């Protein structure tokens, strides 16, 4: 079962944790304050904390598990769950929980290892805590074995066992994070232990990584899956100890499991002395639950392969860059003594301090001071993208290249443990390394659908070739919409959880008012449950029947509400917007000639307002220039015609101005946005897009109190209270945070540049797309993709279906099906743009996902000639794209 390297995460991002990017000056200050010992730095001072213990991204099911801890002293449901998951995945019938791995070690030594014992072990890092216990630890690792470097030297082990003072043999899976053991060797150790009446205690904290190694490198094991290898390794031991903060991806906790009732009996009688009752063992109920769920999930084949792929890729990049290192199952262990030979005994801590100074990354050697000069650079499981890891590797390579500029730390205070060290240092003059990456780490993941091609064929037929009708569980990468699909940050969640709910006025409401007026500069801000609710109120208040509403291309809900209020929409967008091949950079602009003609024809009194959308969705996410906003506003304000923005994607538009208009290249996006909003009298917003929340909207007026009052009157009737707009208090809190996060320059740049990347890769493969690429989506041009299909055969609809079958990616048709039929003639409108929208949710996918999507669509492109059209089998009258069903021609 030799698997190719996975090309993208087999999951998406559910929650993000924002990263800090301290400046060089801040890093110097932080280091000095920390006594130049990076152990003393805190995550808020660090960009990437390269450690794997308790730092993994968990699944959303684990996160949810935190809230179902029943926090009982005795016999909790979470403990029962732990028993079930240990039995199912590890195969042991008894489990005793502990507060962490040290708790497990403590119980084993208290119950099985009398003072004066000799304990053979293949690991060294445990010595720190074993030696003070009046036992002799003997290193029995087989130094001659080239592949399974954690194997036990069996002859040496037997020698030790023959001494008669050895009650247990201590074996670590992936000893010290660096040395895997083979299944054959583990079995031989068990035989020897049995022969001499000792018990084999396996530390399985990194059993997943070891199982992967066995699958990949041990003869005869390639066809076994990780799950069965884990079980067989566990069953080979008498007792398993496991750190909950490693493979189970919890932030604390540990277990001891066994099949032997008398061993278990001893553990549970001792656990009450040191840890807690045997049904919680020093863990909170929530941690028990997270560990239980983590054990159930940890052997997921795709996830294990992704984690190990990241480790291999990271290590290889360092090796290629000439960094001396030793392999780790969870990262690379850098030979600081070789990098900084002049630093002598302080080489490790000097390396760590220099790396932090260079780029804000922490890699720290912990525990006791020892002789080995290794600095572990561990990867928090699932928490970083390949791009981020590549940059961390590049930073380390750059450090190694500058090593001769670095003098060793001078010891000021010392002790036997590394956290006790304090130093003085003369800062070396290093060329700093700047990260250009997502300004967040992955906090929680969401598993995605993994169907086979055959299953996807069945699924799309069952959905009538309509991607709206596919269950999301069947979708691998969901590019249907960027609406309400953002990953929230942990800060947003914290605000959400901390909100004090009320149907009246809340602190969260006031905070939100402040956040909105800071971001947009408008005086009157009215919350709504989403965008269309704001459109409804605005249209009802501002439009008199028969009035024109000129706009830069329509959006479905916006136009609908204008028409329901008796308005007549007129499209005044520039012609280039209708041409998928025009390279004009401001395709969202209003054509002044068209606007003037519309106003002149009916007179300014017959124009309700201008409906001015930022980053025009249906034109392909095309931006409006600052000059155009100024010009439209200057013209309209003279005539007394209000200008209202649809500011749903205003931040993306602001970034496009920063990127494409040289006059704004150095202006923060926050300031560009404030200027943009000055050229309007108000706005509607669907908060589900740029504002980084899953639900919510806004109706705002710059300074007109009368309009605001009229809208609030309708709000009370249709939506909710004026202080919540029908939203939960908690959602108000999440929006307020989202509004702060959305104008972060690093964030919005990485967001829009991700869209650009996907567009470039598709263009490089020759796939016809709308150019220039917009902000939130890449639009495929189905007319050029499938020129052999007539528009009556719904090429965009078929293309979206075909992309799903080939790749598991869900896209949205935006062409003949969406536009509908002319009610008078019954004919399809046959719009100029026959498009498939690949819409990118915010903070949810990595750039590797983009690559996988581009490769998949390139495969569809290659076989385009064999793709057939569709015909309706069920065609609803209104908004037929949502429910319509088709069959293949
Ligand atoms: C979308 F197929 N957009 O792009 P609400 N203005 C703008 C939007 O993009 C927008 C709304 C107002 C969606 C969701 C969607 O026919 C459809 O918060 C520029 O959804 O009410 C929504 O905001 C409406 C998709 C909406 C559709 C209607 O995917």
Image (tube, rainbow, N blue to C red):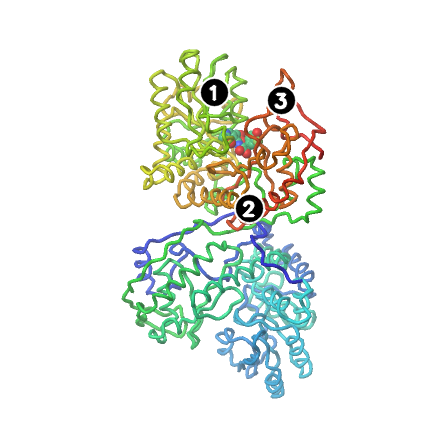
* Residue at mark 3: 821
* Residue at mark 1: 713
Mark 2 vs mark 1: give the one in front.
Answer: 2
Q: CA distance from mark 3 to mark 1?
A: 36 Å
Q: Is residue 242 left or right of residue 543?
A: right
For residue 470, above or below residue 253: above
Whether residue 391 is visible, yes or no, is: yes
Q: Nearer the viewer, residue 633 or 801?
A: 801
Q: How many marks?
A: 3
User: Which quadrant is home to the N terminus?
Assistant: bottom right
- Spot occupied by residue 444 in the image (x, y as percentages of width and height): 54, 50
- Which of marks 1 and 3 precedes in the sequence? 1
- Spot occupied by residue 358 in the image (x, y as percentages of width and height): 35, 60
For residue 462, above or below residue 40: above
Q: Which residue does the image show at 64% across and 20% down from the upper left?
A: 827
For residue 785, above or below residue 218: above
Q: CA distance from mark 3 to mark 2?
A: 33 Å
- Which of marks 2 and 3 precedes in the sequence? 3
Label 3 neighbour load within 10 Å: few <14, some 14-19, many 20+: some
In the rendering, which numbered label is found on residue 329? none
- Spot occupied by residue 625 in the image (x, y as percentages of width and height): 38, 31
Q: Is residue 138 left or right of residue 334?
A: right
In the rendering, which numbered label is found on residue 854? 2
Label 1 neighbour load within 10 Å: few <14, some 14-19, many 20+: some
| Label 1 CB less than 8 angstroms from ligand 1 | no
Mark 3 vs mark 1: give the one in front.
Answer: 3
User: Which quadrant is home to the C terminus?
Assistant: top right
- Which of marks 1 and 2 precedes in the sequence? 1
Whether residue 509 is visible, yes or no, is: no
Q: Nearer the viewer, residue 267 or 846?
A: 846
- Residue 143 sits in quarter: bottom right
């Amino acid at each position: 079962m030799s698997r190719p390297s996975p090309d993208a995460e087999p999951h998406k991002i559910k929650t993000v944790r924002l990263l800090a990017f301290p400046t060089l000056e801040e890093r110097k200050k932080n280091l000095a304050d920390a006594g130049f010992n990076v152990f003393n730095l805190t995550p808020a001072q660090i960009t990437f904390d390269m450690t794997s213990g308790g730092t993994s991204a968990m699944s959303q099911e684990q996160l949810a598990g935190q809230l179902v801890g029943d926090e009982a002293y005795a016999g909790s449901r979470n403990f029962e769950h732990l028993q079930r998951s240990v039995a199912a995945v590890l195969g042991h019938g008894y489990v005793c929980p502990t507060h962490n791995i040290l708790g497990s070690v403590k119980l084993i030594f208290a119950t099985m290892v009398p003072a004066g014992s000799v304990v053979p072990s293949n690991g060294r890092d445990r010595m720190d805590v074993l030696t003070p216990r009046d036992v002799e630890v003997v290193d029995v690792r087989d130094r001659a074995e080239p592949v399974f470097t954690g194997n036990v030297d069996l002859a040496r082990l037997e020698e030790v066992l023959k001494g008669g003072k050895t009650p247990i043999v201590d074996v670590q899976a992936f000893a010290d994070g660096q040395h895997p053991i083979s299944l054959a060797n583990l079995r031989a150790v068990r035989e020897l232990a049995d022969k001499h009446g000792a018990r084999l205690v396996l530390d399985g904290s990194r059993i997943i990584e070891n199982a992967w190694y066995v699958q990949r490198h041990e003869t005869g094991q390639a066809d076994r899956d990780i799950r069965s290898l884990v079980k067989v390794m566990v069953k080979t031991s008498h007792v398993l100890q496991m750190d909950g903060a490693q493979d189970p991806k919890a932030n604390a906790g540990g277990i001891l499991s066994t099949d032997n009732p008398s061993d278990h009996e001893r553990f549970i009688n001792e656990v009450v002395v040191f840890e807690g009752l045997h049904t919680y063992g020093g863990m909170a109920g929530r941690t028990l639950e997270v560990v239980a769920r983590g054990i159930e999930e940890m052997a997921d084949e795709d996830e294990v392969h992704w984690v190990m792929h990241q480790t291999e890729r990271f290590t290889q990049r360092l090796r290629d860059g000439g960094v001396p290192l030793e392999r780790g199952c969870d990262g690379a262990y850098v030979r600081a003594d070789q990098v900084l030979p002049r630093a002598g005994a302080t080489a490790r801590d000097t390396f760590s301090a220099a790396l932090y100074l260079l780029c804000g990354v922490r890699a720290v050697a912990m525990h006791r001071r020892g002789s080995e000069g290794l600095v572990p650079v561990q990867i928090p499981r699932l928490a970083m993208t390949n791009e981020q890891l590549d940059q961390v590797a590049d930073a380390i390579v750059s450090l190694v290249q500058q090593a001769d500029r670095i003098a060793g730390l001078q010891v000021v205070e010392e002790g036997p443990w590394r956290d006790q060290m304090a130093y003085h240092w003369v800062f070396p003059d290093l060329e700093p390394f700047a990260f250009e990456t997502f300004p967040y780490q992955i906090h929680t993941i969401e598993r995605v659908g993994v169907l086979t091609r055959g299953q996807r064929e069945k699924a799309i037929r069952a959905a009538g070739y309509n991607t709206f009708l596919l269950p999301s569980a069947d979708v691998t990468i969901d590019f249907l919409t960027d609406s309400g699909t953002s990953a929230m940050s942990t800060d947003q969640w914290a605000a959400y959880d901390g909100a004090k709910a009320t149907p009246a006025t809340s602190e969260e409401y006031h905070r939100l008012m402040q956040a909105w007026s800071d971001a947009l500069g408008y005086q009157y801000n009215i919350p709504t449950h989403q965008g269309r609710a704001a459109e409804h109120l605005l249209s009802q208040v501002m439009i008199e029947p028969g009035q024109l509403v000129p706009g830069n291309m329509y959006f479905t809900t916006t136009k609908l509400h204008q028409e329901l209020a008796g308005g007549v929409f007129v499209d005044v967008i520039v012609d280039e917007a209708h041409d998928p091949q025009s390279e004009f950079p401001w395709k969202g602009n209003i054509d002044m000639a068209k606007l003037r003609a519309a106003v002149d024809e009916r007179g300014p009194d017959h124009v309700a307002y201008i409906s001015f959308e930022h980053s025009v969705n249906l034109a392909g996410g095309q931006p409006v220039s600052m000059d155009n906003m100024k010009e439209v506003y200057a013209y309209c304000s003279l005539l007394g015609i209000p200008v209202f923005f649809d500011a749903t994607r205003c931040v993306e538009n602001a970034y496009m101005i920063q990127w494409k208009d040289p006059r704004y290249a150095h202006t923060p996006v926050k300031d560009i946005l404030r200027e943009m909003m000055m050229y309007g009298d108000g706005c509607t917003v669907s908060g589900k897009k740029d504002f980084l929340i899953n639900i919510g909207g806004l109706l705002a007026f710059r300074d007109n109190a009368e309009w605001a009052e009229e809208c609030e009157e309708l709000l009370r009737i249709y939506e909710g209270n004026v202080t919540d707009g029908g939203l939960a208090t908690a959602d108000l809190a999440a929006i307020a945070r989202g509004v702060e996060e959305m104008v972060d320059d690093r964030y919005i740049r990485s967001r829009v540049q991700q869209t650009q990347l996907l567009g470039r890769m598709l263009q490089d493969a020759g796939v016809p797309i709308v150019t220039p690429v917009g902000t939130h989506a890449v639009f495929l041009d189905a007319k050029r993709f499938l020129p052999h299909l007539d528009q009556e055969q719904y090429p965009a609809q078929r293309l979206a279906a075909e992309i799903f079958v080939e790749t598991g990616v869900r896209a949205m048709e935006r062409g003949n099906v969406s536009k509908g039929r002319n009610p008078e003639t019954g004919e399809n409108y046959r719009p100029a743009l026959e498009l498939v929208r690949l819409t990118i949710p915010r903070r949810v996918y990595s750039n590797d996902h983009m690559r996988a999507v581009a490769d998949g669509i390139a495969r569809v492109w290659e076989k385009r000639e064999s793709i057939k059209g569709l015909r309706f089998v069920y065609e609803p009258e209104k908004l037929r794209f949502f429910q319509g069903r088709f069959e293949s021609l």
